[in-house]
Amino acid sequence: MGNKILLVIMDGVGYDTAVSQCGYLEGMVELGRARRWKMRTALPTISAAMYETIHSGLSPIDHGVTGNEALRPSIVPNVFQTLHDANFKTAAVAHSYFHTLYNGPYDLFDHIEVEDEEKNIQFGRFYSMEGYNGTNICAPAEIDLCAQASLLIKRHSPDYLLLHSSSVDSLGHRYTADSSQYRIQTWHIDNALARGIPRWLEEGYEVIVTADHGMNADGHHGGAEDIMRHVAFYYFGKGTITADKDSVLDQLAIAPSVLQRLGATIPDSMKAETLFSD
């Protein structure tokens, strides 16, 4: 077995917003305690499609989840299934879409908490955001999500842990990416991570922070604008990423890179070059 990885997905946070609003993450970069790159996402830039891309290393056109309306259990090799089959421990604090993708159809009353080593996501805390609309954003508090992740670490010590926040995406749709609500909520994630990341590093995790997609001034994503496709990729760990600071990384490289760092076999379907040289 290799390292342990905690992947944070800040849903809907574009590159420029992350760099301008995430004072903790940027402060760690400035001090040389983390590294940050720009990453280019796959297309279409829709949440469920990107969740599967991040975990399968395939374009939505190839893995088949091309939008939220096309959500169904994953039918391609992915990080969670690969790790489960190789006897690694997996966990997630995430939107219910991840349960549907990797554990099967989601029922709120049965699956808001998962403790089942037969599942691909063995230990899960899932939120539904039921009732989400323009006047009721239904966004869990960022620090609550971080605390849940820490409890899963304390109780189960998973090899791979996903932490996914939907709040910025929700506020971006309501108020657009050119709004104080969108920018300040991005800071709220950063502020919670400032309390979580030191704990997770101390507990032996490498931490990756990125986003599934960005958002435009219309409160929309799904297309090919740079503001939708460019996201930040922060890395806290001892691995060597050889790309120079001005390189634009490929989102398809996340899945094989996570498996590489964990010491797991990378499925043949994951064709992207891994980000790490070791």
Image (cartoon, rainbow, N blue to C red):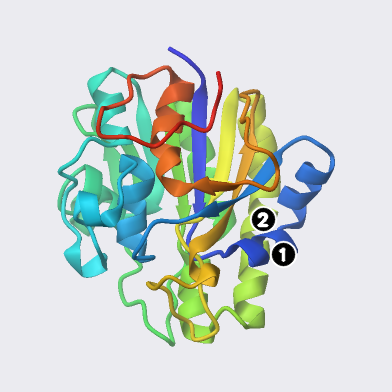
Residue 106: x and y, percent?
A: 19, 54
The amino acid beneath tag 1 is Gln
Of 161 and 233, the residue lying toward us = 233
Q: CB atoms at circles 1 and 2 under 8 Å apart? A: yes
Residue 163: x and y, percent?
A: 47, 46
Residue bearing mark 2: 190
Residue 124: x and y, percent?
A: 34, 41
Residue drawn at 69 percent across, 45 percent down: 195
Q: Which mark is residue 220?
A: none
Q: Secondary structure at mark 1?
A: helix
Choose the circle earlier in sequence order: 1 or 2.
Answer: 1
The amino acid beneath tag 2 is Asp
Residue bearing mark 1: 21
Asked if residue 122 shows in the view, the reply is no
Asked if residue 274 shows in the view, the reply is yes
Q: On the rendered image, what quadrant is the C terminus found in?
A: top right
The quarter of the displayed image where residue 122 is located: top left
Residue drawn at 61 percent across, 33 percent down: 200
